[in-house]
Amino acid sequence: MEDTEADASQGHHPTPREYVNIAIMLAILTALEVSTYFVDFGRIAIPLLIILMTIKFIMVASFFMHLKFDSKLFGRMLYGGLILALGLYAVTLIILFFERAPSA
Amino acid sequence: MAADVQATTLGLDHRKLAMWTFLGSEFLFFGAFVSAYLLYITTTAGGPGVEIFDIPFTSISSFVLLMSSLTMVLAHNAHAHGDLRRMRLWILATAGQGAVFLGGQVYEFTTFYNEGLNMTQSPFASSFFVLTGFHGLHVFVGILMLLSLYALSLTGKVKANQDVKTEMIGLYWHFVDIIWVVIFTVVYLIPEIAVL
């Protein structure tokens, strides 16, 4: 297969203008994140930061990495690794936090 | 034969499939360091803790890295349309922004060192420097790949119809960016807010 041959899965990619619009949205989300340092958001600050982080993550992966337009298998590779890591280290942290790791 | 690439039985480019598999596995790599950092975040051994972070400064370098993803995707877009001149321009812009980010990290590490936070000072310090240092190493490797792509396109080894090469490097670069999106929130912002 030549480099020029498109994958069967590839769909329409955004235009440069659309990429710039996405970057502007990412910049606004980052500004909102940083504002939590200067403005007291109270108890919603940490959940808000996690939500903003997740939105930014998905936007970069979907549009800049073209997951939204490419084969779903690529997305499964990325998010599969993420879910595996989240599960593994969440369990590890819980065990270590409570210091109940089984002794050898 | 660089130009002849076998498709997988899935009808996908096997190089892209390999890159996505690699990127998925990288979550486990960085996840280990983030976990260690969260575990030792309060173990400062009497030294500086998260209050040492300069959030405004790190915010600017985070913004620069985020915007480098825009120039990277514009480089790929230009290459996909056969415009190698514009592709090289965006590649240089991306590498430049990566260099600015790395410069910021060097400045940050130096400042922390001068304020008493060094690699062996505490478990908190070790986990912080290892996590952010490995991310910086990934950025450095990304810059090397970008500059290699730039040089290869100048010498004609990367042709106008080989945009998959730019796309592959772009995938790596965007991944480095999304890892920093996570690090900036989990390592810098949330602990800093929790302390305030």
Image (cartoon, coloured by chain):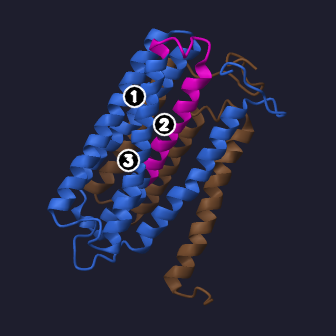
Taking B72 as reference, is B43 left or right? left
In the image, residue A53 lies at what x, y percent? 47, 50
- The relative height of residue B45 versus residue A104 in the rendered view (above or below) is above
Quadrant of residue B6 within the rendered picture: top right
Colour of chain A, in one word, is brown
Residue placed under numbered mark 1 in the picture:
B94
- The relative height of residue B31 versus residue A71 in the rendered view (above or below) is below
Give the extent of the magenta segment.
B153-182
| Badge 1 amino acid | Thr
Residue placed under numbered mark 2 in the picture:
B173
In the image, residue B111 lies at what x, y percent? 18, 55
Q: Residues within 10 Å of mark 3 (few under 14, many from 20)?
A: many
Q: Is residue B114 visible?
A: yes
Which badge, 2 or 3, is on the more N-terminal residue?
3
Say which chain tag 3 marks.
B
Q: Secondary structure at mark 3?
A: helix
| Mark nearer the viewer, 1 or 3 | 3
The disc at residue B136 is: 3
Give the chain ID for the blue colour.
Answer: B
Residue at coordinates 20% horizontally, 60% vertically from top-left? B113
